[in-house]
Image (spheres, rainbow, N blue to C red):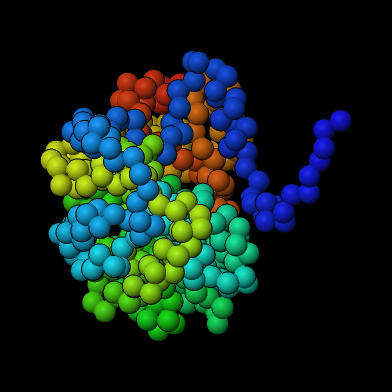
Amino acid sequence: MTKEYEISERYFYLPDSEFTEIMRMAGEKKDIISLGPGEPDFTTPKHIIDFAKKKLDEGYTHYSPPVGRSETREAIVKKLKKDNKIKVDPEEIIVTCGSQEALFLGILALVDPGEKVLVPDPSFLAYIPMVETITGVPVSVPLLEKNGFEFDPDKVRQLIDKRTRILLINTPGNPTGRILKKKTLEELADIAVEHDLVIFSDEAYEKFVYEKNKHISIGSLNGMKDYVITFHSFSKTYAMPGWRVGYAAGPKDIIKSMTRIHMYSALCAPTISQLAAIEALNGSQKCVEDMRREYDRRRKLIVKRIKEIPKMSCLEPEGAFYVFPNIKAMKMKSTEVVRLFLKEARVLTVPGTEFGRYGEGYIRMSYATSYEKIEEAMDRIENTIRKCKV
């Protein structure tokens, strides 16, 4: 007889997910085309891999400081100043196992049980569980299609009370692919100052911006240095998801608190990954532009095809590598649509409800897969909708 253990209450705060079961079903069928991935389909650029191999041969296989290697943080200081117009010192940066760990450390450092974090909805599926895991209270800020999936500053104000500590933003956004405009960022900045909130700005997709759109870091706005922690990742920009390296930049006392917690969790980001990150920042950026151009080519294809398919529509994504089609005209729940596409079209998508309750009526499609596979996937989806007459 197998012994049963009493699992902590913390585990039961985590939301139920149908996506695990959907992924299992997809994994059993080799003919399924996946539009589900949240990671680049590109391999890490060769010059970064070669540099890392050289450093391994030189014996860089030991621990790094919990706050991050000094040379890595120096490279990040230069990058933030040049690309994001954010001026920080090395002591205001922590290097982590991806930006997701940095976000978690930031929440641990600032949020006590019962305190609130304003979270965009729909948004990255880990935000709400992060807060709930430490018995904080996530508060959904609805991002509505009719508003371009932008924050409504008046709604944000209504949701703030004396227990609110953090306003979390993500731009370019996952799953919507939309970019927060400067006017919106300025209004959110005013709210943060007025209510003494800390803004967590997740900018993992900063380099994948299309057409004439522009990414702006809220931490670069006048007077916001003391109110913003900016989170970045190497996973998307340099196709380095498996290297597990990212960073956060913000007020020194918060970074110090995050570093202390880091000592008792992962301890440090992988040494070899931190060295590879330096090469990524200092080396040729042509690889980033090449990926961006290819994502843009795929973006145009998938948007064009969605507009041609009955009972589907979408706002054109401005950044990242996702599109978030509206499927409300199909009169089915998003999980039902995803299962239909998986069973009948052999195409994997993600239900909008994975990204929050305001994601109902939408599905997420990733175009971080080949152009040819996207063409085939959209053909299959269109045929399924026309055949099933949903």
- Residue 100 image position (x, y, % from top left): 44, 52
Query: On the rendered structure, is 132 left or right of 92?
Result: right
Residue at image point 62% right, 38% down: 18
Say whether residue 389 is visible.
no
Residue at image point 43% right, 31% down: 35
For the image, the number of numbered tags is 0
- Residue 58 image position (x, y, % from top left): 23, 36
- Residue 258 image position (x, y, % from top left): 43, 65
Say whether residue 261 is visible.
yes
Give the answer, above or below, for where 175 lies relative to 168.
above
Query: On the rendered structure, is 83 left or right of 272?
Result: left
- Residue 218 image position (x, y, % from top left): 29, 67
Query: On the rendered structure, is 293 left or right of 328?
Result: left
Quadrant for the C terminus in the image: top right
Give the answer, above or below, for where 88 lies relative to 351.
below
Along the line of sight, the residue nearer the viewer: 368 or 253: 253
Along the line of sight, the residue nearer the viewer: 164 or 72: 72
Residue at image point 31% right, 63% down: 93
Quadrant for the N terminus in the image: top right
Along the line of sight, the residue nearer the viewer: 55 or 198: 55
Residue at image point 67% right, 51% down: 11
Along the line of sight, the residue nearer the viewer: 248 or 59: 59
Query: On the rendered structure, is 205 left or right of 359?
Result: left
